[in-house]
Amino acid sequence: MAYEAANGTLGAEDVTPRRSFLVLRRLARKRLAVVALVVIVIIYLAGIFAPLVAPYGFADTDFGNTFAGPSLEHPFGTDRLGRDMLSRVIWASQTTVIISAAAILTGGLALGVTLGLLAGYAGGRVDNLIMRVADAFFGLPEILMLLLITATVRPRVENFFDKFDGWPILGGLNEAGLPDYFLIFGVLSLFGWVGMARIVRSQVLSLRETDYVMAARAAGARTPRLLFHHLLPNVSNIVIVAITFSLGAIAGTEIALTWLGIGIQPPHPSFGTMIFDASGLTTLRAHPNLMLVPAVVVASLLFSFNLLGDALNDVMNPHRR
Amino acid sequence: MQGLASYIIRRLLWAPVILLAVSLVTFGLGRFGPGDPIQILQGQYRDPEVRERIANELGYNDNFFVQYGRYMGNFVTGDLGTSLTYRGLPVADVIFPRLWVTFQYNLLALVLIFAIGLPAGIWSALRQGTWMDPFLISVFLFFASVPVLVSIPVMQWLFALKLGWLPSGGWEVREFFGIEIGVLDKRIILPLIILTLPGIAGVARYMRAQVLEVLDEDYVRTARAKGLAEFTVVSRHIARNALLPLATIMGFALVGLLGGSIFLETLLGIPGIGSYAFEAVFNRDYDSIMAIVLITSTAFVAANLVVDITYAFIDPRIRLGGGAGR
């Protein structure tokens, strides 16, 4: 598909030279995908601007007003410590934004795309080595390994960050739970690159022998230029789809990790901590809204990512338009 | 076919290397991890002499690589070490019955996922362009979007507490010819729903894509032009060709489901490998963790090999893929 586009098989009505415009225009025709995109943007923006948007701080307790139902001051009610649920959901979105962005940038994008490009293009020994390392990671039971690794590494990371206590900026970051974020996106990217590398590699394998790559090589382009200038733009379609799906998956994994006690630590809010706090059967029976609020937000986020990824997949594949 | 043979041999030679690396890393994580298995074994008796004796008995005073070599030597001969979670029991005696438990209900869930997902995918693809196609896929995608840690407590609350239809968890076995089967009890319904619903979307989307891929092929048009019944066209000419790549994925899917069972088994009280892994990590039961990691990654590597070799049969580019600078 990318190959056709690179050769310029534009229809008569198309004067637009840029492929990304075409994709966007086709996507805009899918109403469901547009709604999904809007939901994602709202949740992400709320997360990014949490300090401005959230009506209360995430740890502001009000013991005179615990387990309150929805009211004007607290639209989503309050939890067992009287903390405002709306504010906590907004702050939890921020946690999700930070973790997903960091894990995608380091694991999926940097490592996964680079190694996938390299493996697919270089072939032979390099390919074999990269893909076998990927196999090893792929074969490990991910959740169990995340448990083991965090248990082993956490004390070391915390010791490392303890050195910065009292420093002007780093000390504050430390207080804000930086080691937790660091650990989580570290372990997530450790496993996150494998899927991306495999997808990119298989695409590059079929692009490698095409005329335009041959021509670039004949013209004397060096390997890095070939990889990032000639091959990368033509795998960007599948990279975008893969990122969309994995952004959702990472938000889900955070919940799992936090449930296991190795994710974000209280009082920092995340969807994982909120769901964990609400998931006891007695709490669930007495105060179902405590589960409902984070569950609905996180499920709509994941649902939107899945819908968007599905639509992008269709839009970018000529068979399925 | 000479290329294929050498490809298979090359891949087979890599398998033990991968497993060796995996075992070394896991063993290292265990030995350098926090927590002290000896302290757990000692219980309330904190006598340094006792400690020294236990450490010597278990060989914890030896060099790391000596320990690793001894463990792997035992592992290969079928001795998986001793469980700390179940004091004194050999790990093998604990793990294999639990693997059987997890395997049973996962296999059943997988069968259900494919039984619903395949027809749903085909149905959806054939209705491309109508509202029904995106609607059906969206419904399945929604089920895939609810985290299990939300769905498990909510389903327990709904079906066990509110409606009182199903037990909230547990595992009951019935014996048939000396084999303990647990999937015949009504306790299995809740875990099956929780496992199956999120899984359908993947299979349905995959099948839909496959069918759309072959829908435009000449042989499908020919089949239609011959005047074959629509059902025959779909089942013989479309589904069969779309199924080939899918068959190779089944093995993967089964192994993948095994990995996801930690939460389900812990929350629903199913005595399978997932809940055991969870307990083992919190008890610093490193022999058990090693065994679980090694067994699952061996299964993965095997499934991976089968998939890759099958693809190499189908697509000659894979096995002949040499360097770019040839």
Image (cartoon, rainbow, N blue to C red):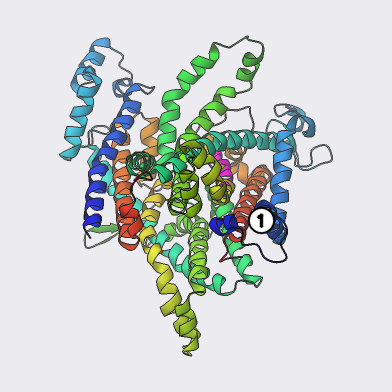
Helix, strand or loop under label 1 = helix
Q: Residue at x 42, y 51 (%)?
A: A205
Q: The C terminus of chain A is located in which quarter?
A: bottom right
Is residue A191 toward the left or the right of residue A301 in the image? left
Q: Chain of mark 1?
A: A
Q: Residue at x 30, y 51 (%)?
A: B305
Q: In which quadrant of the rendered image does the N terminus of chain A lie?
A: bottom right
Direction from residue B64 to residue A94 in the image, left or right:
right
Please name whichever residue, A83 or B163, is drawn nearer the observer in this view of the structure.
A83
Task: Give the quadrant of residue A26.
Answer: bottom right
Instruction: Answer yes or no: is residue A192 visible.
Output: no
- Magenta highlight: main SS: helix
User: Start and end of the magenta stretch?
Assistant: A245-255
- How many labels sit on residues? 1
Q: Position of residue B170 (x, y in %)?
A: 42, 51
Residue B181 position (above or below residue A274):
below
Occupied quadrant, residue B139: bottom right
- Residue B252 placement (x, y as % from top left): 37, 54
Query: Is A181 drawn above or below residue B201 in the view shown?
Result: above
Q: Answer whether residue A201 is magenta in the image.
A: no
Q: Residue at x 20, y 16 (%)?
A: B53
